[in-house]
């Protein structure tokens, strides 16, 4: 994993196993979990961008490392705990996807809040082709993103879709030329990083938790989060700037 700080408040994480199309082995999973656990408590970090290289975002899990594993061995590996560090990362996360985003790589992208995809990107959950199924949230997050019938088609056939199809289906936030993916992701990250950090965390929490709540409970969560933001310095700064017709200077407080 390569960690960079290309813009103020923005951290870029590059998956770095080019010889294996950035397949997610245990080392990368642990490293990603450890880095995110550190970044989530760093007030200087406002947004994280995750990417791979021009050939692959991440081409799935390391099949050789699990081919002979028993159910008990898979349980002992604790993959769900490593994925939890990604799922529970409370700051904005952007996936910049070029090339293959398959299996665990697609699931990693699905954990992001925004996905910028290249036209030549390839999204898919091909686990069924090796006799298993997605195990890191793919069945749940994909259906929430694209709906039951499109999700079932991908899950049951293992087919891949390109970046334009992903954007049309709702799996990607936007699609751009492959060579513009990272720059566009960093542009979005820079813009978000300049925003009110506490409000952004509340937005993410409310959207993710509210999606699984009854409507009235979700609206109550939204209302409470909305009210709590009136105790932040950024709320006072943002509204003062609006009234004074100037650009706000948010401090994340």
Image (cartoon, rainbow, N blue to C red):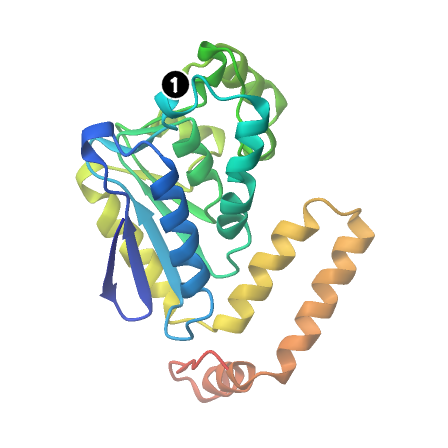
| Residue placed most toward the observer, 88 or 240 | 88
Res. 142 visible in picture = no
For label 1, the crowd category at 10 Å Cα-Cα, with few meaning under 14, some 14 to 19 and many 20 or more, is some
Q: Residue at x 53, y 60 (%)?
A: 90
Q: Is residue 231 left or right of residue 42?
A: right
Relative vertical location of residue 126 with respect to residue 113 in this rendering, above or below: above
Q: Residue at x 39, y 33 (%)?
A: 105
Give the number of marks. 1
Relative vertical location of residue 166 with respect to residue 115 in this rendering, above or below: above
Where residue 48 appears, x then y in whole percent?
37, 57
Where residue 23 appears, x then y in whole percent?
32, 31
Relative vertical location of residue 49 with respect to residue 108 in this rendering, above or below: below
Q: Residue at x 50, y 52 (%)?
A: 85
Q: Is residue 167 left or right of residue 81?
A: left
Residue 102 sits in quarter: top left
Relative vertical location of residue 220 with respect to residue 58 in this rendering, above or below: below
Where residue 123 appears, x then y in whole percent?
38, 26
Res. 151 visible in picture = yes
| Residue placed most toward the observer, 93 or 196 | 93
Q: Is residue 197 left or right of residue 21?
A: right
For disc 1, the marked residue is 160
Residue 20 sits in quarter: top left
Where residue 207 appears, x then y in whole percent?
62, 53
Helix, strand or loop under label 1: strand
């Amino acid at each position: 994993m390569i960690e960079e700080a290309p813009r103020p408040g923005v951290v870029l994480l590059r998956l770095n196993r080019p010889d294996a199309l950035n397949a997610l082995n245990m080392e990368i999973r642990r490293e990603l979990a450890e880095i995110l656990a550190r970044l989530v408590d760093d007030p200087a970090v406002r947004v994280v961008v995750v990417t791979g290289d021009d050939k692959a975002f991440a081409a799935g899990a390391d099949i050789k490392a699990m081919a002979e594993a028993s159910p008990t061995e898979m349980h002992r590996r604790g993959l769900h705990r490593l994925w939890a560090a990604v799922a529970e990362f409370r700051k904005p996360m952007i996936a910049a996807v070029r090339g293959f985003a398959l299996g665990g790589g697609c699931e990693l992208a699905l954990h992001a809040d925004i996905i910028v995809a290249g036209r030549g990107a390839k999204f898919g959950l091909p686990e069924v082709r090796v006799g298993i199924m997605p195990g890191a949230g793919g069945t749940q997050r994909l259906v929430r993103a694209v709906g039951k019938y499109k999700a079932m088609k991908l899950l049951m056939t293992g087919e891949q879709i390109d970046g334009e199809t992903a954007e049309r289906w709702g799996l990607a936030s936007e699609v751009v030329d492959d060579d513009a993916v990272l720059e566009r992701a960093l542009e979005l990250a820079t813009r978000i990083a300049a925003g009110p950090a506490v409000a952004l965390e509340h937005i993410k929490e409310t959207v993710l938790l509210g999606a699984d709540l009854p409507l009235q409970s979700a609206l109550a969560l939204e209302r409470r989060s909305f009210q709590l933001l009136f105790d932040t310095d950024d709320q006072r700064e943002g509204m003062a700037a609006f009234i004074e017709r100037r650009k706000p200077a948010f401090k994340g407080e």
